[in-house]
Image (spheres, rainbow, N blue to C red):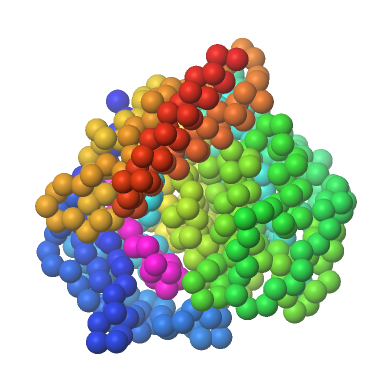
Amino acid sequence: MIRRENNLTALRCRIEIRDRQPVVVSQLYRGPETMGVPAFTPLQALGLPDVMRPREVDPYQLGIDGTPIKEQLLHAVDLTGHGEPVWLQIGRGAHQLAALPWEALASKPIGRAMLRIPNFLVNPFQTGDSRRIAICASGPLAKGAEQVFEHIEILLAVFDAIFRNEPHADEKPKPDVAIFTDLDAFWDMEGRIGQLREHFDRLEIAMPNPEEADRYGRTERVRGPIRQTDRLANPWLQWIADHYAETGADLVHFICPGYFYDDNGALALAETPTRNTDRRWSRFVGAQELALFFDLLGCSGMGFTTTGADIWHIGTRMLAYELSWIRPGPILVAPPTGEFDLLVNTYGALFDCREYDADLAGDMQLCAHPNALFHPVEDHHVDIVPEESDFTRGVLAIERGRDDGFAKIASAAPEAPELYSRGPRYDRGARHPRKDYKQQILRSELASLSSVRTKSQIEEVQDKGALRALDFIARITQSD
């Protein structure tokens, strides 16, 4: 049986205006039940300004020491069982709170992992026997043009370690890892690619030539606020999307600086994969465009390593927070130092290669459904039914602020539970990448209907209609 976090211990934080001042309201939960009374902390006590702009935030002043929030986290540890993490949920609209490095601040006091509560009731991250991973690394000149090779090598070492030690490793094809870099890094790494393949021989490593991306042109420079777009405009994303047009990808991990302005976070990339000359402004990718990119790839696993000055780590954290509200799937923000053990622990559990160790605490931000992490490695056939999960009832109670232990389910469970079993997505004896790709997209679309936000009656009816349509498509494609 799957090991569920039935009675999660969680801290929920949101922002209210009291006496014309922004105040953090924090409440501790055990399952759907409130524990104690809410605490009220002035936003400024955390080192956070009312307006989130780079020149107005000092990353070294951010903290929870001396606040009731820290006391609540210490109490949360007393409520959790052995090997159980503490969960955090940041309410909608509390983008300033997303700037805090919660895990780094809390890891020593609580002595165990802190995980972010997902805002969708269904976990769409299910990988088959053929794992496809993309690493996109860019060092824009405007952010210092930091070398990316060391960060790439850390990730390769992580994936090589987890897949080398996974159960039945010899019976499975090698995971495909494609590295997308700018032209300078490409030529620098091309001479080492043979050594990388020899050293990390559990992986099939490829390096597409950045010159392939010249046909996509460039995106224009944008200053200040982050432009949200409903189309795929950035050449880096177009290049990667075209590379996976026939197969899709399980995980994309970005290595680059972040950026933030007001309510939004973004990735900061060079102008194009072959052009990195702008010393003043990077090219920003916001949450909406990035979500579209992941949707096109059928990709639910989202990873980020932030490079550059400490201030830009805030942008990546805010971006991850935005993504957590608009699309389902695990979202990982790696420690800036690339701590090997934390990455192996997290990615190893997501890819069914090892048990997740909740006692391994550190500066690792992860928003993920417990069904993506907490399961026996050998158990590969468990169906997920959100209505029957205590985790679901707890999450909905937390999000909707209900204190009576009751919460209305946002959407019905998927009618195609086979899409959510932890087994191979296609027969072991053959590879059907196109069919596999379709199932990834369907899984993500179905999971997106399980949002925890309160819905109107019209939205509920629309979701039920979409659910039936997607279920019909799922059954057709599975019989192809």
Write the residue at 67% across / 77% down. Answer: 223
Q: How many marks?
A: 0
Magenta part of the chain:
82-102
- x and y percentages locating residue 102 in the rendered image: 39, 66
- x and y percentages locating residue 362 in the rendered image: 42, 59
> With 463 as the anchor, is 263 left or right in this view?
right
- x and y percentages locating residue 56 in the rendered image: 51, 86
Q: Is residue 215 magenta?
A: no
Write the residue at 30% across / 85% down. Answer: 21
- x and y percentages locating residue 97 in the rendered image: 39, 70
Q: Nearer the viewer, residue 191 or 477?
A: 477
- Check the picture and name the quadrant holding the N terminus: top left
- Check the picture and name the quadrant holding the C terminus: top right
Quarter of image, res 363: bottom left
> With 461 as the anchor, is 229 left or right in this view?
right
Can residue 186 be seen from the camera position used here? Answer: no
**Relative to 162, does residue 155 appear above or below in the rendering?**
below
Quarter of image, res 164: top right
Q: Is residue 99 magenta?
A: yes
Write the residue at 38% across / 35% down. Answer: 464
Can residue 321 be seen from the camera position used here? Answer: yes
